[in-house]
Image: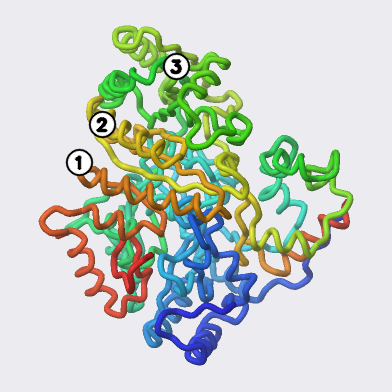
Amino acid sequence: MTRRLLALPAAAIGAAMLLPLGSVAQEKAAFDPAAFYEQRCAYCHGPGGWGTRRLEPRAPEGEAELLNRTSLPPAYTELVVRRGIGAMPQFTPTELTDAELAELARWLEDRN
Amino acid sequence: MSVLPPGIDAATFARALDEFRAAIGAEYVFASDNDRASYLDPFDIGEQDAHATSAALAPAGVDDLRALLAVANRYRIPLWPVSMGKNLAYGTAAPAMRGTVVLDLKRMNRVLEVDEELGTALVEPGVSFFDFKAELDRRGSGLWMSGPSHSWGSVIGNALEHGVGYTPYGEHVEQICGLEVMLADGTLVRTGFGALEGTREWQAFKWPFGPGLDGMFTQSNFAIVTKMGLHMMPEPEGMAGVSMSIPLREDYAALIDTLRPLRMTGVINAPYTIANGWRQMTGGRTRSQVYTGEGAVPRERMEELLAERGQGWWSLTFNLFDSPEGLDLKLSKIREAFAASLPEATMEVRRWRKGEPQQAWMRQDVSLAPLGVVDWGGNPGGHSDFGPVVVPIGERAEQVYAIIERRFIEYGKDPWIGMFGISSRALIFVADMFYTRTDAGDTARCRALFRQLCEDMADIGVGLYRTHIRFMEDAARMHRWNDHALPALNNRIKAALDPNGILAPGKQGIGTWEDGE
């Protein structure tokens, strides 16, 4: 399931409109949790990734990979992403806004 | 728990935050506990709170930045500029001085130009290596990125911090060609030929009429870099990936002396990486899986493990870049040199030709692999690097290596040591201290080890390439010649350009407001 944020931050629209010719808009047009997960999380949390391997002894059997979790409370995901845990550094609000993080956390929970 | 900039009371700081909000929008001023926590150093060598930020500000561009500087100057609030804030093992996004406000430039994230003809690019601070690679792929660029071992960081940040990559363009600071910087008073300056209106040469030539200033804005706090030009490598016709194993600890000086002429004549035309026995054994596992005794894992245990894998004490890896015929010639010269000096060394070679699918050993894809070693010393783990710069002369490199190995063992730490053959004439050592972050005794021991090594190196005239924010003063003090004349000059420049001292106080030991620990 992929939900999209309906409202763009006004500043993101402004920045995109003011780009000089030849430059590329890299402000996200809309947040896609599945794409973000693939681009920023799966390197470590995909099959065989370091995050998956470190979670093997701690997660329920067969659930070390985050996408295989039967339960992953959004509040926990939000805390871990903002604070980091173990070898995982945290994400700042400029990398992932609070609204985007909430969306990502809900997506992870809903798909499990 | 709230944190305040030094000398600012809570009511004054609240007013300043309101002014910052008015300048760039409330949603880009981060002062909640959760937000501030995201700017702590996850791998700090001690209490993270010692380097906690009081808030973070995220300008969208140079106009926002100028408005923030005006407020910061008025209130004398120190700012710590970060581009991606992923300077992992060196402080991440955390400021040297507790309470400094992080100036997060992530929103300034445009790839402004990629010039396929000249092999140059112009980027903003918030462009990560992930972003840059994606943009080059999107454009179908014929230029290759030279990335460091982890791709989360900023292209600008890495070059400004003198980071290292694995291509002929791997000395990233050398690829800088033209900067746009904002001074503390809000003045925007372009260095080099960027100072001419309508220039086509800004990214082409580093030495303009008058002094070349790019270097003074690297590892410094004299200004905020808002754009950076860089040179980029055209896709090569072919590559060879070389992995060598050299049997004995005692082979080290001969290894360095064998490599020097190969690197100096361009036979090896990209940085090489050397790893000692301890370093070879850390990848993808934890220390307790190989040793549970006290102190450093003994060399004999490491030799046992290496023997099980058929590996020698030193590993050497590098990539060669040339046409297929050129690669043949290079490989033949390398084999000849090693046959004469280290005949027991073994060599494996992989090849790639333009048009074939890329492979992992080519290091052209983005990566987060180094995060896998962080837990070597315990969980939650952390690491920090001691990085002296040493000439690639066998006798000198052996002198430095022997001191570092001995001190690590003396302090009970595994001597995880490698070197980058960054250029023809310099090796950068990377001696990693791994620790359990929650073990105060362990982190204190690492800090003491680091400071001991600073003394040891300064005594033989060896300086550092980069340090964690905790050791900025220690590393700066090593520059003793003529009564510390160079650090004193840095402070004079700082006072002239930033009289209120608001930009990154304490970075590289410059413009420090207070003593460290």
* Residue A33 sits in quarter: bottom right
Q: Is mark 1 on a helix, strand or loop?
A: loop
Q: Which residue is drawn at 27% across and 78% down?
A: B499
Report the Cα–Cα distance between label 3 and label 2: 38 Å
- Residue sitting farthest toward the front: B294
The N terminus of chain B: image quadrant: bottom right
Q: Which of marks 2 and 1 is nearer the N terminus?
A: 2
In this view, A68 is above or below B47: above
Residue A101 in view:
yes
- The amino acid type, in three-letter code, at marker 1 is Ile
Q: Which residue is drawn at 41% across and 61% down?
A: B227
Q: Position of residue B416 (x, y in %)?
A: 45, 35
Left/right of residue B213 with respect to residue B4 in the rendered view: left
Q: Do the residues labelled 2 and 1 touch (CB within 8 Å)?
A: yes
Q: Which of marks 3 and 1 is nearer the N terminus?
A: 3
Q: Residue at x 74, y 43 (%)?
A: A55
Q: Mark 3 lies on which chain?
A: B
Residue A22 in view:
no
Report the Cα–Cα distance between label 3 and label 1: 44 Å
In this view, B50 is above or below B67: above
Residue B460 numbered mark, or none: 1
Q: Where is residue B501 in the image (x, y as percent from the top left)?
A: 32, 76
Q: Which residue is drawn at 47% across and 32% down?
A: B235
Q: According to the image, label 3 marks what residue? A: B324
Residue B399 numbered mark, or none: 2
Left/right of residue B61 with respect to residue B25 in the rendered view: left
